[in-house]
Image (cartoon, grey):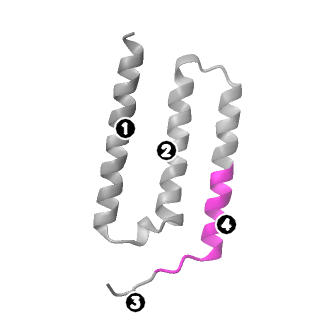
Amino acid sequence: MSDSNHHIVSYRTYGLVLVLLLILTGISVAVTQIELSRWATLAALLLATTKSAFVLAIFMHLRFDQRIYRVMAVFVTLVIIAVIVLTFFDYGFR
């Protein structure tokens, strides 16, 4: 395997993504202070998914890697979503 095709991400990009992740974390904390009842879990999962997508794309270089790695990441994400949905169905029908 050749290591000649590296993509260099600038410190500015890392800094902007870090600031964005900190802002999303602040929003996550703020959402816990709001009474959303049934929607609180969904809001938390959506914010966590957004943060995870940024980490996967930028910090783990998935954005710049081969297509097969993106396909595998999407497949694993879909499996996790299926497990979460099945868990909610189990919890909801008890």
Q: Earlier in the sequence, mark 4 or mark 2?
A: 4
Residue 13 painted magenta: yes
Q: Secondary structure at mark 4?
A: helix
Q: Earlier in the sequence, mark 3 or mark 1?
A: 3
Q: Earlier in the sequence, mark 1 or mark 2?
A: 2
Neighbour tally class for label 1: few under 14, some 14-19, many 20 plus, Cα within 10 Å:
few
Residue labelled with disc 3: 4
Neighbour tally class for label 3: few under 14, some 14-19, many 20 plus, Cα within 10 Å:
few
Q: Is residue 5 above or below residue 54?
A: below
Residue labelled with disc 1: 81
Residue 45 disc label: none
Q: Secondary structure at mark 1?
A: helix
Q: Earlier in the sequence, mark 3 or mark 4?
A: 3
| Residues rendered magenta in the picture | 7-22
Q: Earlier in the sequence, mark 2 or mark 3?
A: 3
> Is 43 positioned to the left or the right of 65 in the image?
right
Q: Position of residue 14 (x, y in %)?
A: 62, 68
Q: Position of residue 38 (x, y in %)?
A: 53, 18
Name the residue located 34 percent from the left edge and 87 percent from the top edge: 2
Residue 15 disc label: 4
- Amino acid type of disc 3? Ser
Q: Secondary structure at mark 2?
A: helix
- Using the numbered discs, state the Cα–Cα distance from disc 1 to disc 2 in whole angstroms: 10 Å
Which mark is nearer the camera, 3 or 4?
Answer: 3
Q: Are marks 3 and 4 in contact (CB under 8 Å)?
A: no
- Using the numbered discs, state the Cα–Cα distance from disc 1 to disc 4 in whole angstroms: 29 Å
Residue labelled with disc 2: 49
- Amino acid type of disc 2? Thr
